[in-house]
Amino acid sequence: MSISEKVKAEGGRNRKASSIVVASNQNIPTSTRMSPMQNPSLAKIEKETVKKPTSATAKKPGPKPGSKSKLKQSKQEVQSSLTDTGHLPKATGPSDSDSNDGGEYCICRGPDDHRMMVNCEGPCKDWYHCSCLGIDVEDAKELLDRYVCPKCSSDDFFTTYKPMCRYHNISGCRKSAQVCLKPNPSMYCSEQHRRDFWNHVATKLRSGEPSSIVSILSHAEVSSLAKFCNDRSEWQALGTEPRLEQKNKADPDCPIGLKYVTPEEAERIESIHTEKAHIKGKIELVQAQKKLLIMIHEHCKVIAQSPQLEVKDFCGYDNRLALNEIQFIRWKQSEEGKKAFETGVIGPRTRETMSFGAPLPFPGEIITTNPSPLESTSTHTGEETFHNYCFKPRKKCKHNGWRDIHGGDYQLTITNYEEHMARLQAEEDEIIQEAEIREATKDYHAHNVTIQHF
């Protein structure tokens, strides 16, 4: 049977273009599809026709993650784009694998996906996305002077920025100032912003009478000050407090203004010194109580090693911690207290100090003491070894947490005393400083102008 007869037998189809024939041949069921061996012309058409891959199979193999040439090429592209325009070229590939170099950069360990990146100038030499670092892209282009990642940064080597244009406070300009411009460095990004800044300052000046004592400066006064100042340092020194020259070379640390205080101020300074000495003694006393707390804590560790003690986690509270300020001073001046602070080791209570801090019974009241689990021994010097310690279980005793309570109380008291000392010192410095300024400005003559208001 000829080809035409077969086509008529299959429904009288007309022959179409080669691409359509191939497509129709693919849609024919397997049982009725013609083989290339039965139709030589169809076999020729199938050979000439190339099957186009779909999007699922049209993956372009990307560069290997370890390809040094690709990484080097990507870094060169980033550097050239930063130098020329500050922008990376947009992605042109059909997929993510075609639009990056396959490398690992930044803290996200992602590829170079054409976002703005900065290079660390530290030992790692890695590249970082500005979006991952929280750096504005425009600031990275205009203000970033040197970027150092947290891994490479130190106290001497860290990220630095260029000085911002002074006009930023007015217009929000975020460009770098021309501080390296030669021969005249500038605090502005351009000459136009310099003029705009001073024009704005001129609008804030007072227009009217040329003389003023306590008011906004006028145009004439600012012009006079500008002519008076020879350089920038003199202009910046305007408005600073006048100081006297130190003439007492024998004692350079002595305040200059102390020589010019009034009798009332000298009396107040003397009272401040007396109060400061009293507070200093208070601080030393609290520090001694804090040292006693540490010695008692260390002694409890020694007692806990005794084989006669059944409860190892005992309270260990010493009633010497309950002494008030007067009682503690008496105990500290006794032989027991002197020995403890000289050696740094707390000893047992003696009969000399046993009455310090002892509760006073009411008429007819009988005070009983809890016996110690350790045998209380008396020596020829009258020492009671374990008489003053609490041997109840720590968690069941009313003294639970006595270390933290007393330690926090002592530290808070010291802090309050130190803050009081700082306030007194600030008051003394202020009195001396005012006396110095008063002496430095005694020859100053202001323009006293009498204004008639009615």
Image (cartoon, grey):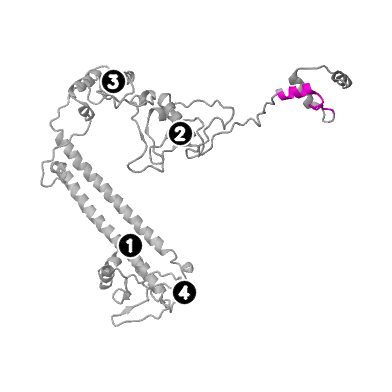
- Of badges 4 and 1, the one in the foreground is 4
- In the rendered structure, find residue 290 and report the number of the disc placed on it: 1
Residue at 28% across, 19% down: 206
Q: Position of residue 203 (x, y in %)?
A: 31, 19
User: Which amino acid does the dot numbered 3 rest on?
Assistant: Leu
Q: Residues within 10 Å of mark 2 (few under 14, many from 20)?
A: few
Is residue 43 one of those drawn in magenta? Answer: yes
- Of badges 3 and 4, the one in the foreground is 4
Tell me the CA gap for discs 3 and 1.
Answer: 61 Å
Is residue 225 one of those drawn in magenta? Answer: no
**Range of magenta residues:** 32-47
| Disc 4: which residue | 311
Query: In the rendered image, which quarter is residue 7 located in?
Result: top right
- Of badges 3 and 2, the one in the foreground is 2
- In the rendered structure, find residue 278 and report the number of the disc placed on it: none
- Specify whether residue 452 is in view: no
Q: Residues within 10 Å of mark 3 (few under 14, many from 20)?
A: some
Tell me the CA gap for discs 4 and 1.
Answer: 27 Å
| Disc 2: which residue | 72
| Disc 3: which residue | 205
User: Which amino acid does the dot numbered 2 rest on?
Assistant: Lys
Q: Could you tell which of marks 2 and 4 lies nearer the N-terminus?
A: 2
